Amino acid sequence: MALTKKERQVLDSQREIDWLQRKIQQYEQALASPSSPSLPSSSSSSLRSSLPDIPTEEDLLHYKSRVDGLRNQLDVIAQFNLSKDCMTRNLDASHFARCALYPIDADYNQLQRSQQVEDAIHERDALVTEFMQQLDQLQKLKIKLANTQRQITETHLENRQLMISLQQTNEGDMNDRTSSVSLTSSQDPDGLAERVHEMRDRLEIARNVLIGLILESNIDYIEDDYLSSVMQRLGNELD
């Protein structure tokens, strides 16, 4: 791991402090050695020859001042490193919080546009839901309309069959009564007039029944050629 410039300075200062402390210990031992009675003179002379020149008191004060200055610098650098670590942690926390709240690739306008898009999506979903509901209601109405048309068609067919049956019955009665009138005309003129009256009454009743059935069934008889001709015949006064 590479060291920063300040960390290298701290390491160099610590090494220099250690070297100075060793030198001070050597000087202190050298100063104390002449007064030691246990050492022979030959040993003392050899020790003095092996040691460097004995510094003066001024040199010791200078070294001590130098050591104190380096210690103060070390304390300042250590305090600076602690402050730097604390600031780094705070900056990291602030950076993570900002990235979470405001992404790097987003700005205020983009966030506003995103909100508008989200609102438009919600509105679209609501409209789609409403459309599907109305479509479902329309399908139900179509089914109901188809059933109603089927019932109208069935009623139309039933009415047509009923009118055909009534017409056939009336034609049969007319033929029977015409034959009867022709047979009895020479015999009873008064009876003939009464029978003609009765036929007219029955035809009037049948006419009213047919007109009522056609009108009540809501059939568009104008578009139907057969029903239109029937209504025209029924609408004319009986002669």
Image: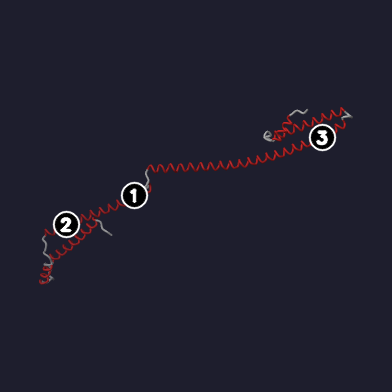
Q: Residues within 10 Å of mark 3 (few under 14, many from 20)?
A: few
Q: The C terminus is located in which quarter?
A: top right
Residue 45 position in % (x across, y down): 10, 70
Q: Of residues 218 and 115, which is closer to you in this image?
A: 218
Residue 162 position in % (x across, y down): 74, 38
Dot 3 lies on which element? helix
Q: How far separated are the C-alphas under marks 1 and 2? A: 42 Å
Q: Of residues 184 and 10, which is closer to you in this image?
A: 184
Which three-letter amino acid code belongs to the residue tagged 2?
Arg
Q: Of residues 165 and 184, which is closer to you in this image?
A: 184
Dot 1 lies on which element? helix
Which three-letter amino acid code belongs to the residue tagged 3?
Asn
Q: Which residue is drawn at 53% across and 41% down?
A: 131
Q: Mark 3 points at which residue?
A: 175
Pick whichever of labels 2 and 3 is earlier in the sequence: 2
Horizontally, is 73 left or right of 205 in the view?
Answer: left
Instruction: Name the residue at the right extreme.
Output: 187
Q: How far separated are the C-alphas under marks 2 and 3? A: 153 Å
Residue 18 position in % (x across, y down): 20, 61
- Tell us which disc is closer to us: 2 or 3: 3
Toward which corner of the image does residue 215 lie, by quadrant? top right
* Residue 95 numbered mark, or none: 1
Horizontally, is 180 left or right of 29 in the view?
Answer: right
Horizontally, is 219 left or right of 46 in the view?
Answer: right
Q: Is residue 137 above or below residue 188?
A: below
Q: Residue at x 18, y 62 (%)?
A: 19
- Tell us which disc is closer to us: 1 or 2: 1
Q: The N terminus is located in which quarter?
A: bottom left
Q: Mark 2 points at which residue?
A: 66
